[in-house]
Image (cartoon, helix red, strand yellow):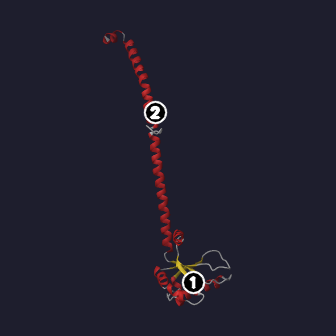
Amino acid sequence: MLHILTENQPGIVKYYVFQSLLTILRLLNPFRTELLTKFLRGSNRGKSPLDSRFDQVKEEVRKVTTTVEETRVKAEELKDREARVNNIVIYNLEELRTENKEEWFKNEKSQYLKLFNTIIGADVVEADVAKTMRLGPKDKSTKRPLLIQFKQRSTKNAVMERLSKLSKAPTPFNKVGVSHDLTRAEREECKKLVQ
């Protein structure tokens, strides 16, 4: 019968087919809306899968950023440690109070060379020292620590190995203390251990 309708009245068949399709779409529309909503919002969380994936990626980026920052801090710490490997810090070494820089440098040199050679017997010459400087602001009431950077690690080790002789040193060297040049993180760790 459909065949007869199609031949005689093709427009009517098309109309009925179209109307049937619209009815079917109307019946499926609530399901389509529900499926679309579930897809866009996610099944139980009220979030779409895209939102969930975005949150996952965001968390991964945060973790990677944190790891990169921690690695950067560790690299800077290692670089700082390596830069300080040949350094020592001398505490309570007499400091000449003068405005004449040449006289002040001469006195500094004679003080630390006397400490190294006469007091502890480390056999250090001026050429073994790459750099010296007092740490902190000038203050008339305190003796600033003296940072000494040696050109070679072996010279530093020779000085550090003989530090036990400081306990029997004459005044004013008997109150002198010598330590490795520690990084900020190492100093904080030492403070925690002491407390």
Give the residue at the far front of this rendering.
Answer: 195
Q: Which disc is residue 143 wearing?
A: none
Residue 28 % position (x, y): 41, 25
Q: At 45% across and 51% down in the image, what residue appears?
A: 60
Contact, mark 2 vs mark 1 (Cβ under 8 Å): no
Task: Give the vertical position of 114 relative to 80 (above or below).
Answer: below
Q: Quadrant of residue 109?
A: bottom right
Calculate the distance from the C-alpha at mark 2 to the C-alpha at mark 1: 78 Å
Q: At 57% across and 87% down in the image, what residue appears?
A: 174
Residue nearest the viewer, comparing 45 with 56: 45
Q: Earlier in the sequence, mark 2 or mark 1?
A: 2
Q: At 52% across and 84% down in the image, what residue appears?
A: 127
Q: Mark 2: which amino acid?
A: Thr
> Which quadrant is the C terminus positioned in?
bottom right
Q: At 50% across and 85% down in the image, what residue appears?
A: 164
Secondary structure beneath disc 2? helix
Residue that carries the numbered disc 1 in the rendered image: 176
Residue that carries the numbered disc 2 in the rendered image: 37
Q: Residues within 10 Å of mark 1 (few under 14, many from 20)?
A: some
Q: Mark 1: which amino acid?
A: Val
